[in-house]
Amino acid sequence: MKDNRLSKEDKLNYDECISQVQRRTNLDSREEAERATRATLETLGERLAGGEAKDLAAQLPPELAQYLQQAYTGIQEKFSLDEFFWRVSQREGVDLTESTYHARVVIALLSEAVTLGEIEDVRAQLPEDFARLFEVENEGNIPEIDELPESVE
């Protein structure tokens, strides 16, 4: 069986990333995979402070980096992991359960594509509950998370 995970030695390219997101999430179209990726990265960018979003973006292809370089990134907006998933859901236009899975797949792929040091820097800026976002044992095997509320107030 072929291992389709990204290797650290290979520079992530946009087409490969979107293909991996589509395949790993079983989405029907490339557009859906792009929407899931964009929603996740934009929301992550809102949660990071200072130059961290820029540092992370520097290790990504320009098409992905732009999602981390929006005007509202780097402000370290304070919100919980549940709020993170809710925001991804709103941006992606899918239900919360679906967006939660998509976000975790995108973050898993991101963790494979950038250096361990960069992922550690990102994680250091996030509250403890965000550790669940990064809990991916291997491709396609994402541990269950607690039930999320229907909406976040």
Image (cartoon, rainbow, N blue to C red):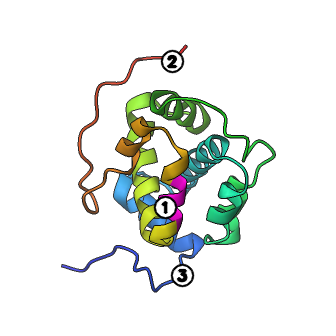
Above or below, 96 relative to 140: above
Can you tell which quarter of the image residue 72 is in? top right
Which residue sits furthest front? 124
Above or below, 93 relative to 108: above
Instruction: Classify mark 2: helix, strand or loop.
Output: loop
- What is the three-letter code of the residue carrying label 1? Ile
- Residue underneath mark 1: 119
Which residue sits furthest left? 1
> Nearer the N terminus, badge 2 or badge 1?
1
- Disc 2 crowd, CA 10 A, few/some/many (<14, 14-19, 20+): few
Give the CA separation, mark 1 to mark 3.
16 Å
Task: Tell me the chief SS of the magenta region.
Answer: helix
Provide residue 23's location: percent of width, then percent of height. Answer: 38, 61
- Residue underneath mark 3: 11
Provide residue 129's location: percent of width, then percent of height. Answer: 40, 35
> Nearer the N terminus, badge 3 or badge 2?
3
Give the CA separation, mark 3 to mark 2.
37 Å
- Disc 1 crowd, CA 10 A, few/some/many (<14, 14-19, 20+): some
Is label 2 or label 1 in front?
A: 1
Provide residue 17's location: percent of width, then percent of height. Answer: 50, 67
**Quarter holding the N terminus?**
bottom left
Seen at 73% across and 51% down, the residue is 50
In the depicted view, which residue is nearer to us: 96 or 111? 111
Give the CA separation, mark 2 to mark 1.
27 Å
Is label 1 or label 3 in front?
A: 1
- Residue underneath mark 2: 152
* Span colored in magenta: 118-122
Instruction: Classify mark 1: helix, strand or loop.
Output: helix
- What is the three-letter code of the residue carrying label 2? Val
